[in-house]
Image (tube, rainbow, N blue to C red):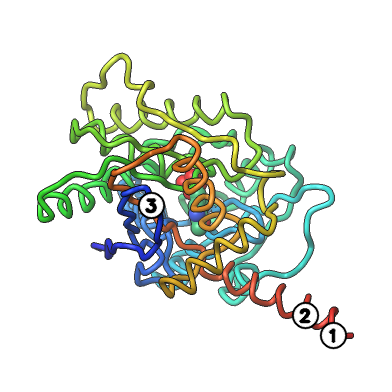
Amino acid sequence: MNTLIQQLCWEEKDGNSLYIKREDLLPFSMGGNKVRIAEALFQDMQEKDCDSMIIYGSVHSNLCRVLSAMCYHRSMECTMICSHEEGENSEETNNEKLIQWTGTPIVHCTKNEIAQTVDSVMEQIRKRGKRPYYIYGSRLGTGNEGTLAGAYADAYKEITAFERQAGWEFDYVFCPSGTGATQAGLICGHLLAGDHKKVMGVMISSRETERAYRVIADSVRAYFEKQQQPLSENFAQEICLLDQYRQEGYGKYDKRITDCLKEVYLKNGIPMDPVYTAKAFWGMKEYIREKKIENSRILFLHTGGTPLFYDFMAEQKEQEGTEKA
Ligand SMILES: *Cc1c(COP(=O)(O)O)cnc(C)c1O
């Protein structure tokens, strides 16, 4: 699963060269980082000899889209636990529709009922003589961090292989950071390679910054334990999270981000979405400017979310419709 790394057209007078790794082109269910993460989960599930997958997320979730599609594709039983927040945006999204297509049964709950819902779903599956696999591990959603980080610890090797061929190294790798699984994986890859790149996560949600650092540190530790690799004591110094570009939080964005999205599309023909990739890309550009980073080689990890690009298009069309009326 080697994805393209290409140079971006983006003129600035800072002497930087900007590259993008096209995880959005991974060849399943419209791609994205969740394809690699789903593959890693399936492999772990197989190792644990389970035969019924329990997925968790919101109805808009890219991970649930990919996992529900992969379960269907592989004839694996799948149940989705879906939590809701008060005042949540109720517009139907493309991901929601695609999850519905698979016919995956959905168990709804509120944010503070997740653990008990996991318990009851697990019990019902066991009663039918099946062996359930909950993607996040325990009822409290912990214990599987090493598996989730593993996806991008492996993908990191594609970046170092590209560098070997090019004969130079990137100075920075930027990625959007949500749960932190992707960034944690990249940091594992970086630590194992012992190279000089800085892995920078651009936060896209309002998760407390300290908690985000802690989750990534735990994930790195879990991965190294799982691999039985020694981990240096001060590894946490390698975690860099930017929390100043998330605007009002998850799913919130203004014109600066949508202008950036359009510019990337117009100059490179690459779709991004305002929730994850365009927000993080915009944050990266701001950071480069603010910190006066110059003459560096910079890689942006395009983590996918293509269905959200079309959600954004639909929203634009709707707005134009209202303006005309
Ligand atoms: C899930 C997701 C992310 C965030 O990845 P994490 O591993 O949760 O930090 C970024 N971009 C897209 C498109 C995603 O679906």
Quadrant for residue 315, please give it.
bottom right
**Left or right of 321 on screen, residue 59:** left
Residue at image location 29% in from the left, 27% down from the top: 225
Disc 1 marks which residue? 324
Kindly identify the residue that appears in the image at 18 percent across and 35 percent down.
193
Which residue type does callout 1 highlight? Answer: Lys
Label pair 2/1, CB-CB below 8 angstroms: yes
Secondary structure at numbered mark 3: loop
Q: Secondary structure at mark 1?
A: helix
314 horizontally vs 177: left or right: right
Earlier sequence position, callout 3 versus callout 1: 3
Q: Which residue is mark 2?
A: 320
| Whether residue 292 is situated above or below residue 76 in the rendered picture | above
Q: Nearer the viewer, residue 298 or 177?
A: 298
Q: Position of residue 229 (x, y in %)?
A: 21, 27
Q: Residue furthest top?
A: 233
Quarter containing the C terminus:
bottom right
Query: Would you call the spot at circle 2 few (<14 residues within 10 Å), some (14-19), or many (20 or more)?
Result: few
- What residue type is disc 2 on? Glu
Q: Mark 2 falls on what kind of element? A: helix
N-terminal of the pair, mark 2 or mark 3, is 3
